[in-house]
Image: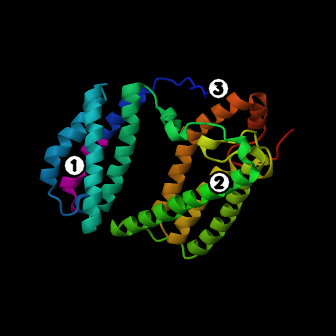
């Protein structure tokens, strides 16, 4: 069985440097706003002394980001590391004191973007192949286990993943949203609409999982992938119905909890899956199933349901 090959990607170093330049400018503007606007200072730093924070943050965040924009890798490492430390420390502070919630969201976003930019500066690309290493490497399932075993394993996987990503994580995010005082009021019927969306998306998820495991002789996990290309059930209308179901479920849970952060969590997950995981998965499928998969890929869209053209 051949391993999925890595697609040729352009050198992204320039984009990484551009991001650090933008981060330096944004950081400088934010510090200017902190010192001239009490509401900005309160929303992003709470009771923290801005002079004490600035003494460290301006050289390690603003200046290092500016230097990293010129391609200095050590500066990019320092800026990224410092951003991560500040994001974690500020999150702990905001959770304990219910202050500086907006600052936490800003620094968490900056930490994630800085990590991506650092990969661009150091490697010239995004090493998405790291996602499918070790226990998550693509491997075909053992066909000798039989359909019942594969369906049972799939349902067990779904219970674990749904319990964690659709219950534990959203509840924690919603609680932090309230604790950090960054919640927003959603329309009155959001909860009812969320229940309907969750039920429909869950039905799609179960139907897709059972179809994959029963027809493909495998499970949705990369470490036990189907041995046959599945073009049946929901897979006739959309290439990745389980991903569509999972993301839609996340939005439904966010509406039920009245949490815009949970909805954002689901949408960010869709971007990560589409741009980081899906290309690797489809490369593996093309390597294993060749022209059959290419015809399927060209006939059925990834996200928007379509009638398959034979």
Camera-side mark, 3 or 2: 2
- N-terminal-most mark, 3 or 2: 3
Quadrant showing the C terminus: top right
**For mark 1, does the 10 Å Cα neighbourhood hold few (<14), some (14 to 19), or many (20 or more) residues?**
few
Query: Which residues lie in the magenta part?
Result: 25-39
When asked about the image quadrant of residue 249, the answer is: bottom right
In percent of width and height, residue 90 lies at 26, 56
Q: Nearer the viewer, residue 23 or 202?
A: 202
Residue of label 3:
2
- N-terminal-most mark, 1 or 3: 3
Q: How far is the residue under mark 3 from the one under mark 2?
A: 25 Å
Residue of label 2:
153
Identity of the residue drawn at 31% across and 61% down: 101
Q: Main secondary structure of the magenta part?
A: helix
| SS at circle 3 | loop
Camera-side mark, 1 or 3: 3
In percent of width and height, residue 49 lies at 14, 57
> In the rendered view, does 291 fall on the left or right side of 111?
right
Q: Is residue 177 above or below residue 245?
A: below
Residue of label 1:
32
Could you tell me if the residues under marks 3 and 2 are in contact, i.e. CB atoms within 8 Å?
no
């Amino acid at each position: 069985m051949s391993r999925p090959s890595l697609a040729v990607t352009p050198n992204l170093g320039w984009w990484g440097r551009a991001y650090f330049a933008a981060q330096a400018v944004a950081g400088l503007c934010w510090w200017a706003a902190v010192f001239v606007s009490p509401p900005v200072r309160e929303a992003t730093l709470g009771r923290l002394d801005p002079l004490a924070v600035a003494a460290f943050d301006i050289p390690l965040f603003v200046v290092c980001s500016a230097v990293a924009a010129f391609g200095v890798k050590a500066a990019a490492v320092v800026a990224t590391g410092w951003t991560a430390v500040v994001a974690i420390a500020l999150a702990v502070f905001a959770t304990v004191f219910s202050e500086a919630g907006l600052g936490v969201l800003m620094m968490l976003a900056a930490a994630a973007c800085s990590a991506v930019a650092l990969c661009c500066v150091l490697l010239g690309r995004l090493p998405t192949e790291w996602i499918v290493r070790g226990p998550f490497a693509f491997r075909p399932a053992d066909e000798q286990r039989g359909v019942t075993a594969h369906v049972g394993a799939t349902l067990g996987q779904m219970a674990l993943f749904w319990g964690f990503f659709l219950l534990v994580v959203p509840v924690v995010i919603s609680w932090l949203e309230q604790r950090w005082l960054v919640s927003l009021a959603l329309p009155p019927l959001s909860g009812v609409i969320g229940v309907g969306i969750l039920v429909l998306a869950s039905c799609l998820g179960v139907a897709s999982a059972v179809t994959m495991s029963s027809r493909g002789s495998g499970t949705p996990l990369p470490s036990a992938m189907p041995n046959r290309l599945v073009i049946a059930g929901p897979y006739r209308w959309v290439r990745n119905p389980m991903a569509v179901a999972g993301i839609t479920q996340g939005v439904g849970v966010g509406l039920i909890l009245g949490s815009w952060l949970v909805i954002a969590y689901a949408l960010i997950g869709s971007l990560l899956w589409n741009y980081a995981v899906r290309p690797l998965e489809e490369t593996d499928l093309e390597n294993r199933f060749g022209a059959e998969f290419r015809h399927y890929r060209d006939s059925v869209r990834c996200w928007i349901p379509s009638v398959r053209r034979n």
